[in-house]
Amino acid sequence: MTKRRAAWMWAAWTLTAGGCTTLAGLDRSYHLAEGAGGASGATGGSSSASASAAGGAGGAGVGGGAGEVPADIELIDDMEDGDAAIEDAGGRVGYWYSYNDGTGTQTPPVYSEEMPVGFHPETLAPPRGQSTRAVHTYGSGFTEWGAGVGFALNGPDMGLFPYDASAYAGIVFWARLGDAGAVATVKVNISDKVSEPAGGICDESAGEGDANRCFDHWSTMAPLGTAWAPVVIPFDELTRVGWGAEPAAEAIDLAGLYTIEFRFAQGEDFDVYIDDIGFYR
């Protein structure tokens, strides 16, 4: 999984930084309530729902969900610039990528020499209020650990470095199903120094049953519906399964976050739109 994700992150950075897309940053706070309303009419295919490549799907019950949108939000990405880059603000540099176990089909596909395509937000028709674009991923047929999309919070020049999110209380985003028959939950994973290989704590080479494994990320299951709805995820509600490094860790290390990912497990069809993601205080 690491190699597949790294390949896509490299491709996303190359396509954006190399001039195939335009990187436009907005250094401002953003209140998601302004973009509420409407519904996209576009639909996609289908596919699978959430599991860690290293340790299966267990451990996270349905947590963060629809609720009152926090008032103090700092935008991570609104997708309106149409490229793979998150907003260049708050010390964040990152690019959206797809990743999967290679057994099924996913759109957008994982970057490869055979399929060197870029990751671009999809135009919404009709728009969701003031929002005209969103990330859209769908797929099916995965039999090992599944698939997902995500982005690095601090990934300049194809690297992966920690991002200090200790000023924030959680994340918020808008989401809806593209296909009403797709799986109605998404696993939201946030990696920190304990679970991400770049943190230098876990052992990327450790296998199932070994101690000190990587990828036991902090996570929760978020519900999805056919209408756009805000999903609010407080950091203090995130949990780990406990098979990874430092299993006794009681809370995510907000001073060293790496990625935010939306994951789907093997054997389930998935089709989801994600829009206007941000940190809130």
Image (cartoon, rainbow, N blue to C red):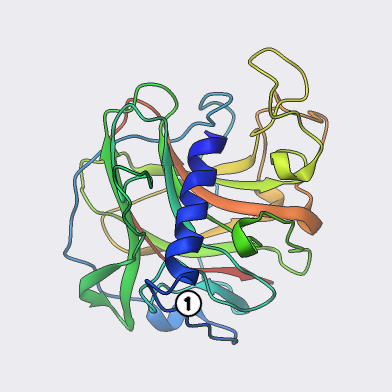
**Residue 66 in view here:** no
Instruction: Report whether 280 appears left or right of 177.
Output: right
Q: Position of residue 207 (x, y in %)?
A: 65, 17
Question: In the depicted view, which residue is nearer to us: 146 or 180?
Answer: 146
* Residue 206, above or below 179: above
Residue tagged 1: 32
Instruction: Report whether 266 appears left or right of 173.
Output: left
Q: Position of residue 139 (x, y in %)?
A: 27, 40
Q: Position of residue 269 (x, y in %)?
A: 27, 35
Numbered marks: total: 1
* Residue 204, above or below 223: above
**Residue 104 in view here:** yes
Say which element carries label 1. Answer: helix
Q: Which residue is at a point 53% across and 29% down the rendered structure image?
A: 53
Q: Which residue is at a point 71% across and 54% down the rendered structure image?
A: 257
Q: Which residue is at a point 52% across and 49% down the rendered structure image?
A: 261
Residue 22 location, quadrant: bottom left
Instruction: Report whether 38 appears left or right of 96.
Output: left
Question: In the depicted view, which residue is nearer to us: 122 or 43?
Answer: 122
* Residue 5, above or below 101: below
Q: Position of residue 106 (x, y in %)?
A: 29, 42
Q: Residues within 10 Å of mark 1 (few under 14, many from 20)?
A: many
* Residue 185, above or below 81: above
What's under tag 1, amino acid-wise? Leu
The image quadrant where one finds the C terminus is bottom right
Residue 134 location, quadrant: bottom left
